[in-house]
Image (cartoon, helix red, strand yellow):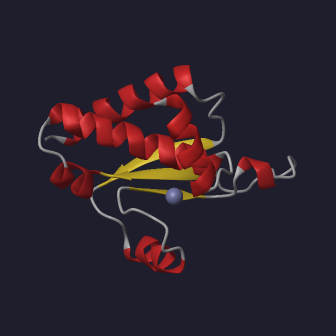
Amino acid sequence: MSDDAFNQLVKRAISELSKDHVEALDHLSILIADEPSEVQLQKLKMRKDHMLLGLFEGVPRTRRSGYESGILPDTITIFKGPLTSLSSNDRDLYEHIKRTVWHEIAHYYGLSHEEMDERQRRNH
Ligand SMILES: [Zn+2]
């Protein structure tokens, strides 16, 4: 799959999610990379909870003071390589992308994995 086509799928997933679950995604950049970088892998070792499909880096909104001008925007990176190798077709890929984006956005909102599981049980 081309980067462009993958980008489109991620955009679609975000717009679908923001309708259903998500309020404003201000201060949040969503990036796409082929594979996690060395630096990101180091962070993943410290936080073993994470799938290699996506990564949230930043300060969850629940822990912000509200007066942090000048800090870097929070970032979600979606990893194309692992997601495409995990998926057997485009539809499957889209579902994985959507789940990954949702998971990382949930981190942005400060949800724990327990709370995520709880919400998914209720919503799906
Ligand atoms: Zn997580």
In the image, farthest residue toward the top: 19
- In the rendered image, residue 78, in percent from the top left (x then y), is placed at 38, 50
Nearer to us in this view, 49 or 56: 49
Say if 63 sits above or below 2 in the image: below
Please give left or right for residue 95 compared with residue 16 in the image: left
Total numbered badges shown on the rendered structure: 0
Residue at 81% x, 52% y is: 64
Please give left or right for residue 86 compared with residue 14 in the image: left
Say if 84 sits above or below 59 in the image: above
Tell me the quarter of the image containing the C terminus: top left
Say if 48 sits above or below 95 in the image: below
Residue at 41% x, 75% y is: 41
Nearer to us in this view, 17 or 31: 17
Tell me the quarter of the image containing the N terminus: top left
Please give left or right for residue 65 compared with residue 100 in the image: right
- In the rendered image, residue 44, in percent from the top left (x then y), is placed at 47, 73
Please give left or right for residue 36 compared with residue 60 in the image: left
Residue at 34% x, 41% y is: 97
- In the rendered image, residue 116, in percent from the top left (x then y), is placed at 57, 47
Residue at 46% x, 65% y is: 50
